[in-house]
Image (cartoon, grey):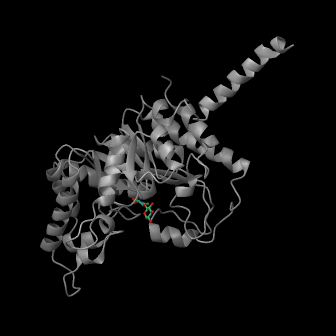
Amino acid sequence: MKKHYLPASLALAALLAGMAANRGEAGSLTLKDAYKNDFLIGAAINQSQFYEQDARGVPIIEAQFNSTTPENILKWESVHPEPDKYAFDAPDQYVAFGEKHHMFIIGHTLVWHNQTPRWVFQDTNGDPVTRDVLLQRMHDHISTVMGRYKGRIKGWDVVNEALNENGTMRKSKWETIIGDDYIEKAFQFAHEADPDAQLHYNDYSLEDEPKRNGAIALITKLKSEGIPITAIGLQCHVKMSRPTPEQEDATISAFAALGVKVMITELDVDVVPATQRNRTADIQANAQATAGANEFTNGLPEVQQEALAKRYAELFRVFVKHRADISRVTFWGVTDGDSWLNTRGRVDYPLLFDRAGKPKPAFDAVIQEATPQ
Ligand code: XIL
């Protein structure tokens, strides 16, 4: 009797093993392996992950990703909170974690209008500093932070989010005090600090035409001036229906044509409908626009789960099409529970692993899109 049923149970075991293989469980195909002929697969990680306290997240990071970005700890307010005080404990640990796991280590970010202390732009009386003083501060910050990790952090988001939605220069304190050439200066200082590091300009909503055109003009200008810019970072904080795959495709083509690498630097898919139209990934505007919108507090229904898988598949189809120009795709977080989109009581499901650390249908969909080996 038993013997009679053995082949069937073996077949079942093989079937289950096959399913497990697709779901990224023990010993099976992982994101970084599936995509090893396409591009690096990264994740932004937080402090409890690189200090190895997050028992759920760390094994996923080790198994699935071959690049990493620090979610917050290399931003100015964290690493350089006071004029004469640098806080290197957490960044040191982040870099050690990345090296331990043989990951391609990214630095994020040197010059940004957010998460930068007020003192940077002020003198001791609280008055705005001069162009020269601010340039000196920018120089010292970049050379100290980049210099410490020279040769170890391989790529840096040098300037983050310098453009308005209409493609003009954002009137940040950097821009108003120094002038438009603060961008050139930041790249020059970065190149001096580590001549081998890849240097990126990083921004959101570059799929929207006016902003994309602004970025194209900016990069064209930097290239013509001989500024050492290696890559454009498309943050890709996307919604379910926009940008369209066609917009993503056209955006990647347009930047690749300028002779820079394209990186997808902060990918996530917001599945919670906004109460108001929010076309931006700007942190403050987004938090306001989406506060209160909270459809799926008790879990993501099957229909949305499948729709998310389809959304991820259509995005990765575009990325794989451009595999010659794309060097890395990084997710902004590991599990849904980590995501920055869960603010003000929102419960979101933007990533490939659920709150228990299990791969979602979107994980399978992404694996399916990789170039077969
Ligand atoms: C976000 C982090 O994920 C949050 O933890 C933090 O409170 C705010 O910043 N664009 C960027 C990232 O370049 O640095 C932002 O990260 C998300 C938007």
- The quadrant of the picture occupied by the N terminus is top right
Q: Quadrant of residue 87?
A: bottom left
Residue at 42% over, 35% down: 322
> Looking at the image, which residue sits at the far front?
2
> Looking at the image, which residue sits at the far right?
1
Residue at 52% over, 57% down: 339
Q: Position of residue 356 (x, y in %)?
A: 62, 50
Nearer-the-camera pick, 68 or 95: 95
Q: Quadrant of ligand 1?
A: bottom left
Number of callouts: 0
Residue at 62% over, 60% down: 272
Whether residue 235 is visible:
no
Q: Position of residue 240 (x, y in %)?
A: 59, 52
Nearer-the-camera pick, 289 or 341: 341
Q: Quadrant of residue 342?
A: bottom right
Whether residue 45 is visible:
yes
Vertically, is 288 above or below 350?
Answer: below
Vertically, is 115 above or below 160?
Answer: below
Q: Position of residue 103 (x, y in %)?
A: 36, 40
Vertically, is 29 above or below 2?
Answer: below
Q: Position of residue 8 (x, y in %)?
A: 78, 17
Query: Could you tell whether 226 is left or right of 312 in the image?
Result: left
Query: Could you tell whether 296 is left or right of 318 in the image?
Result: right
Residue at 62% over, 43% down: 360
